[in-house]
Image (cartoon, rainbow, N blue to C red):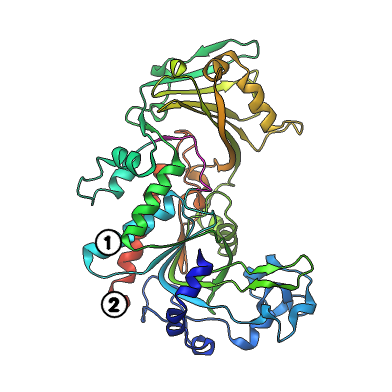
Amino acid sequence: MLRYVKVAKRSNIGSLSTSFSSYCNSQVATTSRVSSPRVYGTTPPSSTAYNHPRCLVAHTTSVPGNLQVHRRSFSSLCDDDSPLNQPRESMPYDVVIVGGGPAGLAASIRLKQLSQQKGIDLSVCVLEKGSEIGAHVLSGNVFDPKALKELLSLNDDGGENWTKDLLESQDSHATPVTEDAFLVLTESGGSYQIPNVFLPSQLHNDGNYIISLSKLTRYLGEMAEGLGVEIFAGFAADEVLYNTDEGVRGVTTKDVGIGKDGECKDTFERGVELLGRQTLFAEGARGSCSETIISKFNLREQSGASVQHYGLGIKEVWEIPEEKFKKGFVQHTLGYPLQSSVMDKTYGGSFLYHQEPNLVLCGLVVGLDYENPYINPYQEFQRWKTHPAIKSHLEGGTCVQYGARVLNEGGYHSLPKLTFPGGMLLGCSAGFLNAVKIKGSHCAIQSGIIAAESVYDSLTSGEGAE
């Protein structure tokens, strides 16, 4: 945990930030090329009291734009002696990655792979809000392995043994898809299968695997730590930090130990600044910092992107009797309970996958643009499980896990501009889910690989090289 890292590394922090004022006149690089690789700026002490989100009542006009959304009315906390006015400790890195999902971990791994390959080492940290890597990752998941194989291509086995490594590392099977079915469910309990020959090629799952994406990210997290990436789990990025010229210079973690009345408790601890020459945002769909960045730099307007739209995915994992298990079976459905005719305007569908040893991964995705205000996605999911084409897979089984997450379904035409001064957007923070293919993990990993290669080349070339 970062709290203990701070204690263990206090001597390092002292050497990196000998005094808070020593950073006041320095400037963070906001472009990919910099004149000095490890020089970081920070807010002058004299303005610190006015820049804390809890002290904005009397000083709104002097607050940077990114703090406006945090406005609160605790003006009594603006005393000079308040712990909220004290400077944060800073931890500088070459690259700060916000989010420990497939995209963020892929970027961190490729950065360290390039460091070993080319001999110029970059310091990399990953900030993950979940209690551990994988804790906040939820997906179907029928997985296209091509991006993962590219990421692991520098391994001794060329990435071909990733399924075996995943099983040994996480005791989780990557089950090859053996059968693919696409059904239309009717309200009367019937179903009609669409022949695969009539389905678009994007829906064919030959060569794909049924996996636990949470377990895959844990596997990637172990690999990243083995390469020297520093991972801070259990701490969410609370605020984006900017240079005087408005380029991103890093993020802060949240202050902790504040009571409901806004007063600091005995357990109060100031958040930490994680400063980076480049900051990569891989928070997932609707990430708070990512949305702030997109709005601040008008990234959707710059790319001419369509408005992003979203869906809610609800998932359960069932353990079923072995006699009902169909290894590698994949089924997707339309129709009941969301649509009863081709004219219905409720967008959505379902998935059901059989993963070794005897698990069924099932779920329903409902587009959040539905017009009927009485639709309850969870209740629709429960109705869906009573359909004979679904019920037959679950009878005699036990639900062992459940969860939900938001999906960005706008696709290619809703992608914002991916770069901004001081960083990039990766994975679902940008919106790389391919809704037609019903997959996005491989796109997230690929975006992390490409971003890492671009960042490494920029930070190690010219005057920015160490």
Query: Does 446 lie within the magenta span?
Result: no
Residue 403: give x, y in percent of width and height. 59, 38
Instruction: Measure the alpha-carbon separation of dots 2 and 1.
Output: 14 Å
Q: Amino acid at mark 1?
A: Leu
In the image, 28 versus 1, the foreground residue is: 1
Q: Quadrant of the C terminus?
A: bottom left
Q: Can the viewer see residue 448?
A: no
The residue segment tinted magenta is 135-143
How packed mark 2 is, by other alpha carbons closer than 10 Å (few <14, some 14-19, many 20 or more), is few
Identify the element where label 1 is drawn. helix
Quarter of the rendering containing residue 372:
top right
Q: Which residue matches tag 2?
A: 466
**Residue at 68 percent of width and 82 percent of height:** 49
Q: Amino acid at mark 2?
A: Glu
**Mark number, residue 114:** 1
Query: Does 142 lie within the magenta span?
Result: yes
**Residue at 56 percent of width and 59 percent of height:** 294
Q: State which tag comes first along the sequence, 2 or 1.
A: 1
In the image, 34 versus 238, the foreground residue is: 238
Q: Can the viewer see residue 277?
A: yes
Residue 222: give x, y in percent of width and height. 37, 53
In the image, 206 versus 88, the foreground residue is: 88
The number of callouts visible is 2
